Image (spheres, grey):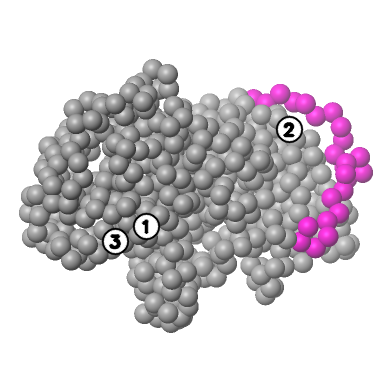
Amino acid sequence: MTCLSDTWAAQVAGVAVMLLMAACSSDAPVAPKPTETAACNGVSVRVQSLEPLQHVVLTGAEAACFALARDNREYLVVPQITGATLPYGGYGFRLGDPNTITARTAADAIEEPAWLRAIQGSNADPAPDAQSVLDARMRADEGTWTPGTSRHAGDVRLSVLGIPAVTVNSIRRFSVLNTLDATPGYTAVNAQLRFAGSRVLLYVDTLAATALSDAELQGMGTLYDERLAPAVTSSFGDGSDIDANGRVIFLLTPTVNAIVSASQCGGSGFVRGFFYSHDLRSTESTSNRGEVFYAYVPDETGRWSCAHTKSEVVANLPPTFMHELQHMISFGEHAIERNGTGEEVWLNEALSHMAEEIGSLSYEARFPAPSGRTNPASIFPDSASPYINPNLLFSYRYLFSSATFSLTSCAPGSFCSLSERGGTWLFLRWIGDQQGGPTFRRLVETNLTGRANLEAATRRSTAALLGEFSLAVSADSLVGLPRNTAPPALRFSSRNVRRLYKSLFDAFGILGGVGRPFPIEPLPLAAGGSVTGTMRPGTFLTYRMRVSAGTPTAVIRMLALDGTPFPATSGAQVSVLRLP
């Protein structure tokens, strides 16, 4: 029996390492400088004697040489590379006893099994669809804002004096982006104001005036105005308001449908909606000089592109709106209100996927189990599923290949794959559970970006956060033990992650691309043995080690592949959890 709703809306500085596996052709390995002088023998080094479910994150010299106590103890051992200045790439490492020959390579161990590759081709993300291509363009466009040289917020606000008053049924002319091409193109459209709320103004292109009835538009406007927009602004802040109307403009127009032709739609997908920073940072004639969310319209006959039913549009737009509204607020807060730069893509996308989950949480609160569920055993009400299910799948893919997908950077030339974004969503979910919801607002209402932003908002180093998170995903909801068994730092207070992924497996299984009930399967690391492998900065691998009563203290080293220590700039660290 599935525990998920039946509704489903979605489908590893290179200054440290001798070996760099193919991950980015521009990466160049640099030989490390040997710095070791002390012996690593379990006598001259500190022995980590941990109580059951006690953990430690070892950094620097401690990570390069430590020992685990014996007496039939079992541990999770999680190596990471966390350096902030490392280029994106796969960095070789050696983990375990320095005096042994490696028994296996972690690279072999983390490859997808043949049966899974045969079924789904690869656990890697598919080629970007049209929505992803446009989203990448939007984030790249935000990156062209240069504080101190661009027209700042005050100048932009002075440009809105000619915008007509807000009156229901009034007509306003908009300039709408109409292409996925690098060179922007625009279509001028006339749109009628069909709903005016306290937070959202809903306009419909006059060419699609009958795509939705007055009653349907009233219901849509009420949903966005009274539930979705407040949920996002209460979590991330109000953002900018350069048109001084106190509201977000929601524009439904077939120009969005036509960004992708009907003949392309089947292969590349279509665009549901987007926010365009050009409207906030420019006073050109093609800027609408306000906070605008653009969306596609129902098109039963395929007049403008591939056909879309009313029910499809109504179901698909809410999570997209919440996702894009966070991007709008983020750019407004960072660039317009504080004249900073746009947020780094990995953190920006993490926050937007968190916005989607906030939509789910609102429906979960409204429909406590078993209400609102076609299947009473479902974890989520049917109405929450479109907001949460994609993130569950993307985060499953991330954890399944946790040495491949980084939490703190995107693959070069990308704006983060779905798996990378799923991982960063899960990372923020854990941070929110640890520090509370206001953390998300602190991450947005600032001119800091990336790691500096994360560390200021959480008052912890990125490396420390990564170290505990890498343990929490396994320690939370330990099989056969109460939820509160793991220490608070290693738990998700709002989600039972093992239950969630088990439900995903029950619903879709191997044939649906979910290969096992829990994505992480710890790799064996024998006391007295060692392994080699590769990982990317911001990733991790999970090993399980048993130190039997008759085994001497287990000495472990986290080294570069050639057996020399990583320099401090690599951020090499090892997190250890003693299991019950």
Q: Earlier in the sequence, mark 2 or mark 3?
A: 3
Closest to the observer, 290 or 269: 290
- Mark 1 Cα-neighbour bin, 10 Å: few <14, some 14–19, many ≥20: many
Identify the disc placed on residue 565. 2
Q: Is residue 50 magenta?
A: yes
In the image, what residue occupies the spot 60% across and 56% down? Answer: 433
Where is residue 280? Give x, y as percent.
32, 33
Q: Is residue 360 left or right of residue 442?
A: left
Instruction: Tell which residue pokes out farthest to the right in this image.
Output: 43
Query: Tag on residue 228?
Result: 1
- Is 369 on the left-hand or right-hand side of 477? left
Q: Are marks 2 and 1 in contact (CB under 8 Å)?
A: no
The magenta span reads 31-54
SS category of the residue bearing label 2: loop
**Callout 3 environment at 10 Å: few (<14), some (14 to 19), or many (20+)?**
some
Amino acid type of disc 1? Answer: Leu
Query: Is 506 placed above or below 454 here?
Result: below
Which comes before the other along the chain, label 3 or label 1? 3
Q: Quadrant of residue 171?
A: top left
Q: Is residue 266 magenta?
A: no
Against 531, residue 8 (above or below) is: below
Q: Residue at x 88, y 41 (%)?
A: 45
Identify the amino acid type marked 3: Thr
Question: Which residue does the numbered mark 3 point to in the structure image?
Answer: 222
Depth check: 333 or 559 in front? 333
Q: Residue at x 26, y 58 (%)?
A: 221
